[in-house]
Image: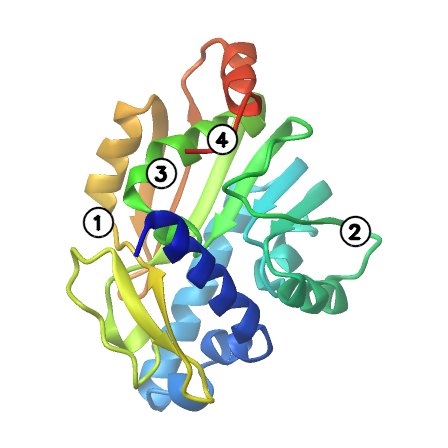
Amino acid sequence: MSDEERLQEQMAYYRARAGEYDQWFLRQGRFDHGAEQNRQWFAEVEQAARALADFEPTGRVLEFAAGTGWWTEHLIRYADSVTAVDASAETLTLNRARNGESSVRYVQTDIFTWKPDAHYDVVFFSFWLSHVPPERFAAFWNLVRACLAPKGRVFFIDSQYNPLSTASDHRLEGEKATTMTRRLNDGREFRIVKVFYRPEDLTARLAALGWRVTVSTTGSHFLYGSGTREEEDHAAITAGITQGRMR
């Protein structure tokens, strides 16, 4: 399967999963691993939320892969404005129901083909970087850079490699795998991109691209990072992104 076909299947998966997505976050159904594991999960969610609060995502905030709005809800507490981007109309409908139209501007588009329409003080994304194909890693971070205003900041949250983070009938294929099979409640299966990063490796890789980012973990389930880009010719980067798709 080609890279483009994989991404199309990934997009179809998240559209189909929209109505059951929150079961993952709430540890329900196939994602319920028992009281002790669930307590650990929610404690680490709170740790990630505190890290975001300490970061204070103020000003104009752009959220990639906004999904059903669990983290959009956090962003609007601090931001002057939030632009929420997602390829799935189904998840954005749920996001609107949770957070309303007055606080958020919603943009339905494929992030891999989207061109920034403004500069933002903060770019935020949760559980998205792991779904970016490795060969598009640098291009995605160039997009982030193009979206940021001078002295803009980035904050992200993502998954650590942990079989207890996913559904009981999902199988992780090794920490170095870059794809996995996901199953819906009705049994349909989709092959998606899923890349797990170690904090030290991700920090080094971003440093090589000109980012000053600190990456930490909550313990078992999540990693989170924040930082800024190196000062450089912002206009030239923006021009390079807007000339074509993110490849």
The residue where tag 1 is placed is 198
Q: Which amino acid does label 3 sit on?
A: Arg
Q: Is residue 40 above or below residue 10?
A: below
- Tell whether label 3 touches label 2 (CB within 8 Å): no
Q: Distance between the residues labelled 4 and 3?
A: 11 Å
211 with respect to 144 (left or right): left
Q: Earlier in the sequence, mark 4 or mark 3?
A: 3
Q: Distance between the residues labelled 1 and 2?
A: 34 Å
170 with respect to 85 (left or right): left
Q: Which of marks 1 and 2 is nearer the N terminus?
A: 2
Q: What element carries label 1?
A: loop
Q: In this view, does 66 lie above or below 25?
A: above
The residue where tag 2 is placed is 103
Tag on residue 136? Answer: 3
Residue at left offset 47%, top offset 42%:
155
**Residue density around tag 3, few if under 14, some if 14–19, many if 20 or more, within 10 Å:** some
85 with respect to 165 (left or right): right
Between tags 4 and 1, which lies in front?
A: 4
Q: Which one is in front, 170 or 203?
A: 170
Q: Which one is in front, 77 or 82?
A: 82
Q: How far apart are marks 2 and 4 (CA)?
A: 24 Å
Q: Which amino acid does label 4 sit on?
A: Leu
Q: Position of residue 225 (x, y in %)?
A: 38, 43
Q: Which amino acid does label 1 sit on?
A: Arg
Q: Where is residue 184 in the image (x, y as percent from the top left)?
A: 44, 81
- Tell whether label 1 touches label 4 (CB within 8 Å): no
Q: Earlier in the sequence, mark 4 or mark 1?
A: 4
Between tags 3 and 1, which lies in front?
A: 3
**Residue density around tag 4, few if under 14, some if 14–19, many if 20 or more, within 10 Å:** many
Q: Which amino acid does label 2 sit on?
A: Ser
The residue where tag 4 is placed is 143
